[in-house]
Every structure is written in structure tokens, then in C-alpha cells.
Image (cartoon, rainbow, N blue to C red):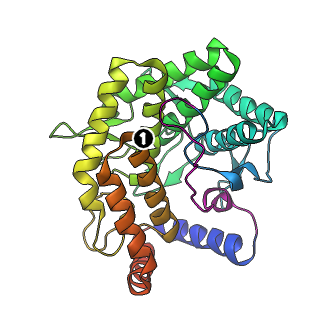
Amino acid sequence: MKFTQRWYYYKRLFQTYIFKKGSNLSFWHETPILNENSFTDHLGQYYMVFDDKANYSGPFDSKGIPLLDYQSNIMLQYNPVAISQYGLAHYNRYKEQSNDKSKTIFLNQATWLTENLQKNVFGVHVWNHWFNWEYKELLKAPWYSALSQGQGISLLLRAWIETGSDIFKESADKAFESFLIPTSKGGVTYHGKHDEFWFEEYIIDPPTHILNGFIWALWGIYDYKLITEDSKSDLLLSKALTTLKKYLKYYDTGYWSLYDFSKTSGLKMLASPFYHQLHIVQLRVIERLTDEVIFGEYARKWEQYSRNPLKKLLALTLKILFKAFYY
């Protein structure tokens, strides 16, 4: 299974970056850019620009909802994270350019989210991924994620502000409940032994605390708190930020950032150059949202790593070795 999955992964890499054939990777791997037009005191443009995502050329379904081509045996699929990011990208474009077409696209994605929010086997409302996916183990469909929950909330709240339609706010409320429930009971928050609160991108046992997914999910909680001033979201955000501040040092290798905080023996899972740059931008955003200098300090340190050719080469070499021997 793992050999087959690696083969499909490298095939998608070559098709996307060498032969310029579209795949799911071509949607995800845009250059991360902080949105200077976002705000910290009220809900406005999303915190990353997402220009390339707004320019996504398809495929789409008949309602303009993006489909991602995972090729191999998965093929075309809806991905709730991609749908939310596509919607947020067009929300930014609509607010920046007063673009009515982008407003329609943004609201179409929000409507899809309201129509596809479903209860899981625990009775918790989630956006499911309806395809199997290999991470450390096989995630069997349907599976759900704190990342999709957080970004879905961010999109729905903006749709509610723009339209006043209660269906968007009600769906955001339902999705938010998943963060109040531990992963063991169908939610997306892992409660650590020392009162840590982790938002899990992939829900497996033991948890791996993927950094970029945790942060993107955290932005959804920040948005929810900003809009609702709900005491539960305030406490949740506080605990998550405390966890992030405490554990950032464990994602720092001294020459690069780690993708996750998993307890693998041997090689650690370093971030790819794309995810390393994403971490930097995400930390800069959080510094702006919270005024906590620690996030800016790590962003600047990791930026220095990426500018050092020897550290960059070391990280890339170890990343390739990790992919070859693990997944």
C-alpha cells in the first residue's frame, strides 16, 4: 500500500511541476502571501491573499464548485478545504474589486457548505471527505478535519455578514461545536495531558499535530470569537494559542520547520519548502491578530533558515529521504 501511494504521489509531482498537467497539488501549492488588507478588529478580507486560488481553472461541477483531480484511483473529488479556500479567495477579490462575479462565486461555495454539513457517527456536524487518503495510516472515507471545519466557519461567517441569511450563521454555529468536542467523541480538538488544546488536521491515534492545519483552524475560531463574542470560543482560542506558544520550539529543528509533531523514530517529517513558507506567513498573521511577539520571532527565524542555501539544501535532502522511507 505505502509503495503504491508513494508512486502515485511522485507521479502527481512530475505531472504537475514537470509536465504542467493539473492535479490536486496545483491548487494547493500557490505562493503563500499575507493579505495586508485584512483586519484584526472586525471580519474583513481573509488573512491570506489566495490570488492563485481565485484563478483556479477547474474542473468544476455544474454549480461552479471546484473539483480536485487526485488522479490514481481517487480521481475527481470535492474537497471541503479547497471549496472554502476558493470561496475565501473570491471573497477577497469581491471586497478588493467590488467584483459581482466573485461575490456570486463566493456565495455559491458558502451555499455548498450549508448543504453538505452532515452529522458524523457521533452526531457531530462536520464536512466529510468522501475519498480514502493515506497519511500515516489509511484515512477511510468519510473522514473529517479541523482544517475544513475552521476554514468553513471563516467562509460562512463572511457570507452571513454579506447577506444577513441565517442559514450561513446557523451552519457556522454547528461547525463550531465540533471544536468543543474531543476527537475521541467525534470532534476535532485533542485534549493533551497538560491541558493542551490541539486542532487536528488528520484525526488519527496517536495524534500528530500538523502545524499548518492547526493554525488555519485556529483562524476559524478567531473569526467566530470576533463575530459572536462567545465565551466558549474565547476560552478555546486562549487555550489553543497557549498550546501553540508552548510547543512552537518543538517544530524548530535549528535549520528548518517541521510539518508535524509526530513521534516517529528516525527521520522527522520536515516541512516542504512550500509548507515552510506557509508556516512563516501563518505566524506573521497570528502575530498581527494577537500582538504576541513570539510568533513574529519564529517567523523571522524560519525566514532566515529559508535564505540560507546550506540549511535549505539539508532540509530538502532530508525531506526527500523521509518521503522515500516513510510516506
Is residue 263 shown above or below 100?
Answer: below
Mark 1: secondary structure = helix
**In the image: residue 196, left or right of residue 95:** left
Is residue 48 shown above or below 165?
Answer: below
The C terminus sits in image quarter: bottom left
Give coordinates of residue 130: x percent, y percent: 60, 40
Q: Residue at x 26, y 49 (%)?
A: 245
On the image, which quarter does residue 122 sit in?
top left
Between 211 and 24, the residue placed more toward the observer is 211
* Overall secondary structure of the magenta section: loop
Residue 139 in view: yes
Give coordinates of residue 40: x percent, y percent: 48, 36
Among all residues in the image, which is located at the extreme top?
166
Q: Amino acid at mark 1?
A: Leu
Bin the neighbour count of mark 1 within 10 Å (Cα to Cα): few under 14, some 14-19, many 20 and up: some
Q: Residue at x 25, y 44 (%)?
A: 243
The magenta region covers 21-43
Q: Is residue 284 magenta?
A: no
Between 113 and 86, the residue placed more toward the observer is 86
